[in-house]
Amino acid sequence: MIWTDALEAQARVHAEREYPAECCGLLLQPRGGGGGVYRPCDNLQGEDPALDPDGRSRGTDTAFRLDGLEVIRAEREGLEVRGIVHSHPDHPAVFSAMDREQATWRVGNDAPEPTFPGVSYLVISVYDGRAEDAAWFHWNEGLGDYEPGDAP
């Protein structure tokens, strides 16, 4: 297990600091093993609000967009992305339809596939500026969907 209490504390502080916007960050691990690293990232959702699965425009208070260059930078530094972290301001720590939309891709009518195979997702609920519940979600190949599970 690479996710530690110290890393969770860092992610919670980040989520509280970004409230009422969603925070986003990466759980990284050196290639070949070793301890985890939490890297806070900027939420770019406000620069180009995306549409949710229902066609509504979403801002940083209800969605996040992680800069893909953060993933490339981490990989160039010899780190593997093991988790993507984000918060849900004033909402529960569940994997929403928008989260699933961003975490998967599909071609035509094919079944969805994970955008980042082997990467888990942590959702932290933040109510009135205080981080509360947190839940990890992992891809289940048999279900073709994400389901709750233990920290990586």
Image (cartoon, rainbow, N blue to C red):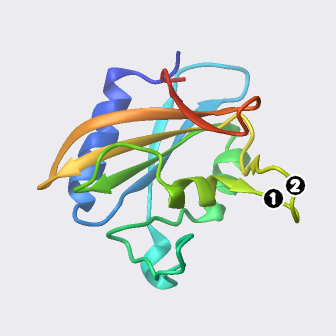
Q: Residue at x 37, y 57 (%)?
A: 23
Quadrant hosting residue 11: top left
Q: Are marks 1 and 2 in contact (CB under 8 Å)?
A: yes
Badge 2 marks a residue whose secondary structure is loop
Q: Residue at x 32, y 26 (%)?
A: 6
Tag 2: residue type?
A: Asp
The answer to which of 46 and 71 lies nearer the viewer is: 46
Q: Is residue 57 above or below residue 74?
A: below
What percent of the width, then of the height, locates residue 115? Answer: 72, 51
Q: Which residue lies under the disc numbered 2?
A: 110
Query: Would residue 114 appear left or right of 49 to someone viewing this image?
Result: right
Residue lying farthest left? 128
Query: Would residue 64 appear left or right of 142 to someone viewing this image?
Result: left
Tag 1: residue type?
A: Arg
Binning the other alpha carbons within 10 Å of mark 2 as few (below 14), some (14 to 19) or many (20 upward) gives few
Q: Nearer the viewer, mark 1 or mark 2?
A: 2
Mark 1 → mark 2, Cα distance in angstroms: 6 Å
Q: Is residue 63 above or below residue 133?
A: below
Q: Which mark is residue 141?
A: none
Q: Which residue lies under the disc numbered 1?
A: 106
What percent of the width, then of the height, locates residue 95? Answer: 47, 46
Badge 1 marks a residue whose secondary structure is loop
What percent of the width, then of the height, locates residue 124? Answer: 33, 43
